[in-house]
Amino acid sequence: MTAHTSILIHPDGRAEWVADKTVAEKALGNYGVGRAFLTDASLGLRISMSDCALLMPEEFPENPHAVAVLAHVAGLDPAGAQATRGPVVLWGYDPRNEWDSSRPFTEREREVITEALAVAGCTTG
């Protein structure tokens, strides 16, 4: 099995498991990339999205699928979750990786993310 470091969630509900976070982040567009921890307590998972996505709604469509996935993984209610726009990347974080700070998902993380994708109505290819 490929060691995936990231899941790329598109606004139309398509989701792609990706082995290289930098490849996934290229799908975020030509602007800068904003990164944050999923929650204050989830130091092992981070999210990336275009740092212009919330400021440019005409270019970045709402991404309710990513909201639902991220909320499920974080154990939060999607109704109170932060809106997302455009493609969103959820990835495994390792501060010791000097290349791109990513790491493969653990088996448990992959299980939870797979469940979250199903709950959000995402399709994977």
Image: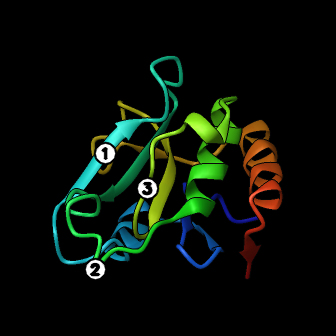
Residue 60 at x, y percent in the picture: 34, 74
Kind of residue sitting beneath label 2 = Glu
- Sequence-wise first label, 2 or 3: 2
What residue is rendered at 48% in x and 35% in y? 38
Residue 59 - label: 2
Query: Which secondary structure, mark 1?
Result: strand
In the foreground, 110 or 60: 60
Please provide percent x and percent y for residue 19.
Answer: 55, 65
Name the one closer to the observer, 82 or 104. 82
* Sequence-wise first label, 2 or 1: 1
13 or 83: nearer the viewer: 83
- The circle drawn on residue 35 is 1
Evaluate if marks 1 and 3 touch, with contact meaning CB atoms under 8 Å apart. no
x, y percentage for residue 71? 63, 40
Q: Residue at x 83, y 60 (%)?
A: 118
Instruction: Determine which residue is flagged by label 3.
Output: 84
Q: Which of marks 2 and 1 is in front?
A: 2
